[in-house]
Image (cartoon, grey):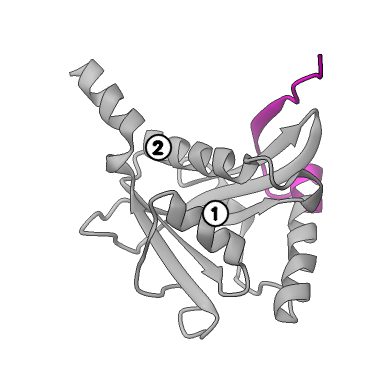
């Protein structure tokens, strides 16, 4: 019988060696797709508790994915407690296994536990697989924001976390 791969997500700092290596991989992907690196100003402190978190996903012990969230002043449908998803990436060697969807769910749950009521994110038109992931996960297009707000290649999405079924269940059970 074939072995089932193990998947685990671990909170890391942005400068952890596994995180740094994967962030560099995604930067090379941006160069291939857009001709340059992502120039969004990023401070490692953005991803420190309680206002943020950075995660590395491991498949059979190998670092293959990253995802993070940080507080933002963007609002979604009147929800003011919003986080922005950053650095979502699954290395090509681990793609097509549903890991991006698992990681996105992890980001949503940890952000909700930290008090976020909604999530926003920015992606590019040359990342159709990312757009497909977000729209199939309940994200809807929102007005552009942030560093790339004026870029014709930028698309922004948002989702209310209060609508997550597992959060409704937990709230019902605790009331």
Disc 1 on helix, strand or loop?
A: helix
Measuring 81% from the left and 47% from the top, which residue is drawn there? 93
Q: Measured from the top left, where is residue 123 in percent x and y?
A: 54, 67
Disc 2 on helix, strand or loop?
A: loop
Residue reaching furthest to the front: 1
Residue 125 sits above or below residue 151 on the image:
above
Q: Measured from the top left, where is residue 160 in percent x and y?
A: 31, 49
**Image quarter of the N terminus:** top right
Callout 1: few (<14), some (14-19), or many (20+) C-alpha neighbours within 10 Å? some
Query: Is 59 left, or right, of 99 in this rendering?
Result: right
Query: Is 77 left, or right, of 69 in this rendering?
Result: left
| Front position in the image: 41 or 116 | 116
Q: Which mark is residue 152?
A: none
7 inside magenta stretch = yes
Q: Could one spot residue 91 in this view of the protein?
A: yes
Which of marks 1 and 2 precedes in the sequence? 1
Q: Measured from the top left, where is residue 171 in percent x and y?
A: 24, 25
| Front position in the image: 164 or 70 | 164
Give the magenta-colored segment's residue range.
1-21
Measuring 51% from the left and 50% from the top, which residue is drawn there? 69
Q: Name the residue under label 2.
A: 114
Q: Distance between the residues labelled 2 and 1?
A: 14 Å
Q: In which quarter of the image is residue 24?
A: bottom right
| Front position in the image: 100 or 53 | 100
Measuring 78% from the left and 74% from the top, which residue is drawn there? 32
Q: Mark 1 points at which residue?
A: 46
Residue reaching furthest to the left: 175
Measuring 33% from the left and 38% from the top, which residue is drawn there? 164
């Amino acid at each position: 019988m074939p072995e089932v791969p193990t998947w685990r997500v671990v909170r890391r700092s942005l400068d952890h060696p596994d995180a740094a290596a994967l962030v560099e991989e995604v930067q090379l992907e941006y160069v291939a797709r857009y001709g340059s690196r992502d120039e969004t100003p990023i401070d490692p402190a953005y991803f420190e508790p309680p206002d943020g978190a950075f995660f590395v996903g491991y498949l059979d012990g190998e670092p293959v994915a990253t995802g993070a969230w940080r507080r933002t002043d963007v609002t979604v449908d009147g929800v003011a407690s919003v986080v922005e998803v950053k650095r979502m990436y699954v290395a090509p060697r681990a793609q097509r296994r549903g890991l991006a969807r698992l990681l996105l769910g992890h980001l949503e749950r940890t952000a909700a536990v930290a008090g976020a009521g909604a999530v926003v994110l920015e992606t590019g038109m040359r990342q159709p697989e990312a757009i497909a992931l977000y729209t199939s996960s309940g994200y809807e297009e929102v007005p552009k924001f942030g560093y790339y707000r004026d870029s014709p290649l930028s698309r922004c999405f948002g989702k209310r976390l209060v609508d997550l079924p597992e959060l409704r269940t937990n709230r019902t059970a605790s009331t």
